[in-house]
């Protein structure tokens, strides 16, 4: 039974994540300061009695240090706990004491939890820190929320460099319809249309979508992404326009639908094992396009042509994933050609914004041309598939542990 430690487990995304892990046969170490909600959750989970509730205030370093005792060996550690600042007080009017608890929970606690559990991490263990879209773009009048989440992203990357034996990633959620957010909408404190107006997919995410992202990042298949950020935000982080998006009109497809994959622009056989044939029943259609992977120039044109091919096959609710070569200085022998790769990546983001209303998704993976396809199977199942319906417009760098260091069980 693999084991995951999940902080902030008693509510919201953390609770949905614990339920998903437990249903998949994981033992969960459930960390939260709400003892009543924590123990109730532990009793509700499958395999009752196997899970370990730990009532801990993560703003207290001494309580965090106690995790070193009584916690089983860990396959994954998920730093999900966090808080925002709802005071609407300008930063220059805030005292150090007002900001202290937020910084303690959002920035100091994740590092302290990793330190406390360092001897419990199994070889190749996965550490996932939950930041926010606020760590990618500033949100004013939320105190030090954005700075704390930006700091957590930098901290995650530094940890990945310091511990190459581990897989360390950071999840940046967008607007998620948790119970708290639903209550604020009902009370009239949040206008949902305004909240999603700059989100190309035109909707909020469900907590289950975040849980599935965390489940993937906690698996061995996430190894190629070590040190990277996974924004699951409906494309909000890549949109720079001033015109708002209309709310989505298409329902989210079931997150567990079978994936039906088409491979274009290269030999299909090495990649077909990414998904089983969906058959005649409902499925989620997706394409992988390999045409740009071996190009030394003309990446912008190759991505544009891949998009045209995809759009001719799919009108709504499908995904395109383009494989790109690494963006290294050596790729451009002339400075005049150095903008080709950046233009191709911005085209990915632009297409995501144009296609969002139809729930058509496009993402890119940067991988070495000699990549071993099997090392990317689990990553592609997630990015291409229905569990990632809130991921679009992203270019993910995924060659840190690929191909030579890919785990043997890349399909986990």
Image: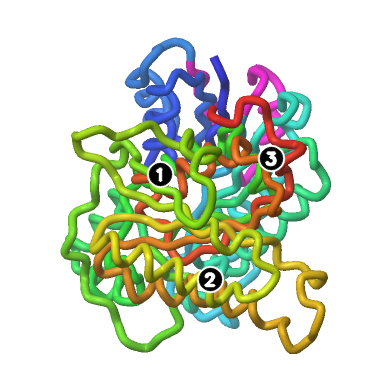
Q: Of label 2 and label 1, which has the lower sequence position? A: 1
Which residue in the protein does label 1 denote? 13
Residue 167 shows which numbered tag?
Answer: 3
Q: How crowded is the residue under tag 2: few (<14 C-alpha within 10 Å), some, or many (20+)? A: many
Asked if the stretch drawn in magenta spans residue 136, the answer is: no
User: Visible in this render: residue 216?
Assistant: yes
Q: Of label 3 and label 1, which has the lower sequence position? A: 1
> Image point 61% across, 46% down: which residue?
59
Secondary structure of the residue carrying tag 3 is: strand
Which residue in the protein does label 2 denote? 302
> Magenta residues, as a range?
51-75
Q: Position of residue 117 (x, y in %)?
A: 71, 30
Q: Quadrant of residue 88?
A: bottom left
Image marks 3 and 1: residues in contact by CB distance under 8 Å: no
Q: Position of residue 395 (x, y in %)?
A: 56, 63
User: Visible in this render: residue 189?
Assistant: no
Q: How crowded is the residue under tag 3: few (<14 C-alpha within 10 Å), some, or many (20+)? A: many
Secondary structure of the residue carrying tag 1 is: helix
> Could you tell me how far apart the alpha carbons at marks 3 and 1 are, in whole angstroms?
21 Å
Q: Position of residue 222 (x, y in %)?
A: 60, 40
How many numbered badges does the structure rendering display?
3
> Could you tell me how far apart the alpha carbons at marks 2 and 1 are, in whole angstroms?
38 Å
Image marks 2 and 1: residues in contact by CB distance under 8 Å: no
Q: Residue furthest front?
A: 267
């Amino acid at each position: 039974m693999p084991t995951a430690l999940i902080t902030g487990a008693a509510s919201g995304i953390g609770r949905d994540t614990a339920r998903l892990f437990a249903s998949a046969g994981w033992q969960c170490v459930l960390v939260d300061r709400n003892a009543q909600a924590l123990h109730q959750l532990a009793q509700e989970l499958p395999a009752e009695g196997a899970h370990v509730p730990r009532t801990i205030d993560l703003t207290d370093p001494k309580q965090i240090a106690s995790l070193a005792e009584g916690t089983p060996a860990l396959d994954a550690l998920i730093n999900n706990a966090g808080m925002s600042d709802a005071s609407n007080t300008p930063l220059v009017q805030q005292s150090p004491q007002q900001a202290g608890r937020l910084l303690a929970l959002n920035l100091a606690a994740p590092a302290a939890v990793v330190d406390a559990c360092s001897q419990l991490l199994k070889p190749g263990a996965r550490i996932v820190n939950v930041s926010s879209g606020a760590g990618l773009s500033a949100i004013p009048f939320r105190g030090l929320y954005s700075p704390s989440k930006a700091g957590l992203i930098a901290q995650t990357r530094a940890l990945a460099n310091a511990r190459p034996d581990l897989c360390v990633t950071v999840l940046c959620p967008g607007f998620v319809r948790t119970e708290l957010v639903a209550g604020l909408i009902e009370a009239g404190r949040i206008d949902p249309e305004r909240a999603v107006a700059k989100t190309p997919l035109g909707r909020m995410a469900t907590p289950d979508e975040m849980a599935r992202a965390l489940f993937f990042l906690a698996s061995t298949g996430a190894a190629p992404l070590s040190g990277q950020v996974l924004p699951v935000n409906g494309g909000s982080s890549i949109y720079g326009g001033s015109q708002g998006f209309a709310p989505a009109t298409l329902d989210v497809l079931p997150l567990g639908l079978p994936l039906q994959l088409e491979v274009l622009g290269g030999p299909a056989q090495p990649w077909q094992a990414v998904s089983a044939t969906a058959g005649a029943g409902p499925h989620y259609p997706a394409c992988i396009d390999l045409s740009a992977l071996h190009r030394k120039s003309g990446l912008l044109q190759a991505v544009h042509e891949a998009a045209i091919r995809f759009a001719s096959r799919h009108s709504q609710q499908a995904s395109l994933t383009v494989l790109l070569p690494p963006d290294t200085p050596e790729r451009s022998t002339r400075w005049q050609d150095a903008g080709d790769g950046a233009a191709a990546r911005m085209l990915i983001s632009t297409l995501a914004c144009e296609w969002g209303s139809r729930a058509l998704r496009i993402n890119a993976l940067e991988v070495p041309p000699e990549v071993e396809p099997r090392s990317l199977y689990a990553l592609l199942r997630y990015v291409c598939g229905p569990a990632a319906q809130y991921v679009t417009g992203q270019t993910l760098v995924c060659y840190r542990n690929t191909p030579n260091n890919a785990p043997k069980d890349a399909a986990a």
